[in-house]
Amino acid sequence: MSVSSHWSTVMSKVRGRLGRVVQTRSEPGLVAEGAKRADISAEFVLAADHPVQVWLIEHALDGSDDEPLLIRRSLPADGGSRSWINGQPASARQLRELGGLLVEIHGQHAHQKLSLTEHQRRWIDHQIDAAVIRRVCTAAEKHGVCQAKLDDLLVRVGQRSDQELLEFQLEELNRFNPAADEYAQLEVDQRRLASVDAMKLALDQASHALNGEQAGASSLTHQAARALEPMIENEPALAEITQMISEAQVNLDEASAELQRLAENLESDPQKLNQIDQRLSRTIELARKHRVEPDQLPALHQRLSRRLSELQRFDQTRAELEVDLTEAREYWWQQAKKLHQAREKVAKALCAETAKALAQLGMKDAKIQFQIELNEQAEVATHGADRVEILFSANPGQTPKALKKVASGGELSRLSLAMIIASADPGQHITRIFDEIDAGVGGETAHRVGEFLHQTAVLGQSLCVTHLAQVAARADFQLKVEKSAKKAQTKVEIRSLDADERVAELARMLGSEASEISRKHAQSLLKGERVLA
């Protein structure tokens, strides 16, 4: 398939929408001005052996056997999004996983990234067993945990010179030995012992009010109950009132007994009061000295005790953590070397396949090498210890040099396309979208790119956005994208072209739809004949 258009920005949006329906990023700018939301959906007809079929079953998102896979996203204007797979709500993680199995998008600037060493390393890593890479990542993360523990110890324990002062402070607190919740209880005991006389008077008055022979509350409630009991038969409502008075009587009796117990236990103890006063005074003094609240003194005591223990065990603990760190780095290094070996093996095969693809693209003398250097002094990293760089030579007799120094834009485009095909998995059945991947090429090279892209159909469905007639002519079918503006609204329409319309569109791409020469050239292109534009 090929898509041609006057407007590359329009095609960028079309490609972007297909990408966003199977990816997780959403942008409010996708929603038309004045609209509440944008709805994007995509339909995929899957072969019975497509890897997605297994994924859908595992996630209980499979539909009927004869129905296509339907993915829908709703993007509110105020941000966020909701997703559905076969009509069932789906999480962002599920959409991301499914999208990776369905669509592979190669943008018009992808070849520019090829000159970046990180991007070059990822080309190789895509071909390596994921378990090998995962072990390096796990080892690096474990090393990071060990390093964090050691750093935390150094920060938490602080200066070793603090130990002498800390020992003095702890000795003072150990002698005092503040207990949890002690300060609050001391205040309660102090208030009680300091007011024994007033407390006795209050207890006596309360007891008299409850148990006075003539006017005591207990005696009066008894009188009230006795007065009402004979009248209950005449007025049933009195039964409930009498019950409430009886309950009040029980409470009064219990209160009276508790007052008596307190009065019996209440004794003046000047010596104990003096001890409490001294303890409170010392608590406040120490709290002020350590700049904490009095009730926080026990917690401070425990905290300083732990810190002194850490200081005393500092050398031992540090040595243990350093051993752990060394062992973690050694394990990471062993896994990084295995990854290095895997990269070298994969790079050799990838270079051979890429060279074949480049020959098909008219660069039979091109040479490509992966320079993979294992750095023994490398910082621990999740991607291993390799420095990866592509060395490239487009012409015979030239020594391959760093890709970013010797490759032109057109050469980068063809090399990127060759590597995409060389690293593709034939059993993946993925849909590949090439968005102006042919940028920077023309003439005879454009013919070769068109033929080459046509061959990618054996690897799965391929969609190509192009402005080159030579490329568009090689497609099995062609779509045209047209933009129109009506009533302050912009609309984009995509339609399939029949045979005559393809001739007209290719003629337009070659120069002029009305030109007879351009139309003949277009017809020749559709027949597979070479035409240099």
Image: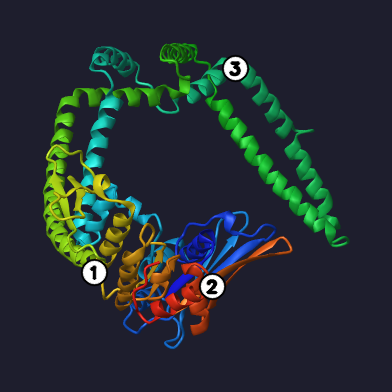
Report crowding for label 2: few under 14, some 14 to 19, many 20 or more residues within 10 A (C-alpha). Answer: some
Type of amino acid at the residue the image marks with label 1: Gln
Residue 377 shows in the view: yes
The first of marks 1 and 2 along the sequence is 1
Residue visible at 30% across and 52% down in the picture: 114
Q: Whole-percent x and y of residue 518?
A: 47, 73
Q: Dot 1: what SS?
A: helix
For marks 1 and 3, give the one nearer the viewer.
Answer: 1
Type of amino acid at the residue the image marks with label 2: Glu
Residue 382 shows in the view: no
Report crowding for label 1: few under 14, some 14 to 19, many 20 or more residues within 10 A (C-alpha). Answer: some
Q: Dot 2: what SS?
A: loop
The label on residue 360 is: 1
Q: Is 49 left, or right, of 27 in this rendering?
A: left
Relative height, residue 317 to residue 111 (above, below): above
The first of marks 2 and 3 along the sequence is 3
Report crowding for label 3: few under 14, some 14 to 19, many 20 or more residues within 10 A (C-alpha). Answer: few
Quadrant housing residue 222: top right
Quadrant housing residue 416: bottom left
Residue visible at 83% across and 52% down in the picture: 228
The first of marks 1 and 3 along the sequence is 3
Q: Dot 3: what SS?
A: loop
Tell me the residue that label 2 is attached to: 513
Q: Residue furthest right?
A: 234
Q: Quadrant of the N terminus?
A: bottom left
Viewer-side residue, 128 vs 6: 6
Type of amino acid at the residue the image marks with label 3: Ser
